[in-house]
Image (spheres, helix red, strand yellow):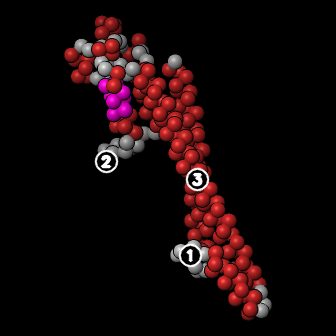
């Protein structure tokens, strides 16, 4: 599937290919598979690693008997390099989770602030004295950030709540992806 055709054609085996060239090759193949392009959709990371793992671990069933000795030595992905890619992908995914969690915490803080505004709006609406209404309105205005108003803050709450749900789902998907990647790595050993 993912063969070094040019290398195979000239007969180099894995031991003849410099280690850094193997790293560059795997990184290039990984990027080509996971990147979304005009002519193809994005493939998730664990699916990509499955493809690479399939090419790193020789499959005797997929090799014709007359080419068994040649094909099993040529053009395969170096599993040592692939293991490094697994670690890099897991580390990168953990970093993405960390950044997403920071954003989730930001959203939660914003929602707390906006909940206070909502509370003061309710108090303002239930106040009978004009002086109290003005007091609550001024307090709400102190809590608003740039671009927020009494008219639009409810919409902002909805947007933040939707973003929070999406980001929490993203974090769960990323943790699931890490679990899949770890199982794949264990299969390859």
Q: Nearer the viewer, residue 19 or 111?
A: 19
Q: Is residue 7 above or below residue 93?
A: above
Q: Which residue is mark 2?
A: 38
Q: CA distance from mark 1 to mark 3?
A: 22 Å
Q: Which residue is mark 1?
A: 148
Picture residue at 53% right of the left edge, 21% below the top: 187
Q: Nearer the viewer, residue 20 or 6?
A: 20
Q: Position of residue 104 (x, y in %)?
A: 60, 55
Quarter residue 8 falls in: top left
Picture residue at 64% right of the left edge, 60% below the top: 108
Say if the magenta span includes residue 25. yes
Crowd band around label 3 with a 10 angstrom C-alpha radius: few (<14), some (14–19), many (20+): few
Q: Position of residue 6 (x, y in %)?
A: 23, 22
Q: CA distance from mark 1 to mark 2?
A: 38 Å
Q: Residue furthest bottom?
A: 130
Q: Nearer the viewer, mark 1 or mark 3?
A: 3
Say if the magenta span includes residue 72. no
Residue 102 got which mark? 3
Helix, strand or loop at disc 3?
Answer: helix
Q: Nearer the viewer, residue 89 or 33?
A: 89
Part of the protein shown in magenta = 21-28
Q: Relative to 133, is 49 on the left or the right?
A: left
Q: Earlier in the sequence, mark 1 or mark 3?
A: 3
Helix, strand or loop at disc 1?
Answer: loop
């Amino acid at each position: 599937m993912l063969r070094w055709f040019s290398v195979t054609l000239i007969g180099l085996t894995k031991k003849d290919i410099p280690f850094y060239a193997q790293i560059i090759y795997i990184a290039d193949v990984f990027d080509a598979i996971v990147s979304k392009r005009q002519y193809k959709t994005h493939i998730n990371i664990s699916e990509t690693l499955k493809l690479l793992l399939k090419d790193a671990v020789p499959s005797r069933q997929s090799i014709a008997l007359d080419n068994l000795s040649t094909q099993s030595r040529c053009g395969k992905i170096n599993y040592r390099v692939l293991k490094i890619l697994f670690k890099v992908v897991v580390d990168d995914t953990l970093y993405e989770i960390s950044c997403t969690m920071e954003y989730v915490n930001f959203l939660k803080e914003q929602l707390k602030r906006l909940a206070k505004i909502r509370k003061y709006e309710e108090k303002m609406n239930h106040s009978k004295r004009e002086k109290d209404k003005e007091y609550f309105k001024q307090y709400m205005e102190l809590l608003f950030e740039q671009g927020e108003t009494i008219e639009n803050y409810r919409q902002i709450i909805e947007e933040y709540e939707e973003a929070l749900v999406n980001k929490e789902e993203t974090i769960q998907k990323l943790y699931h992806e890490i679990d899949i990647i770890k199982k794949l790595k264990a299969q390859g050993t």
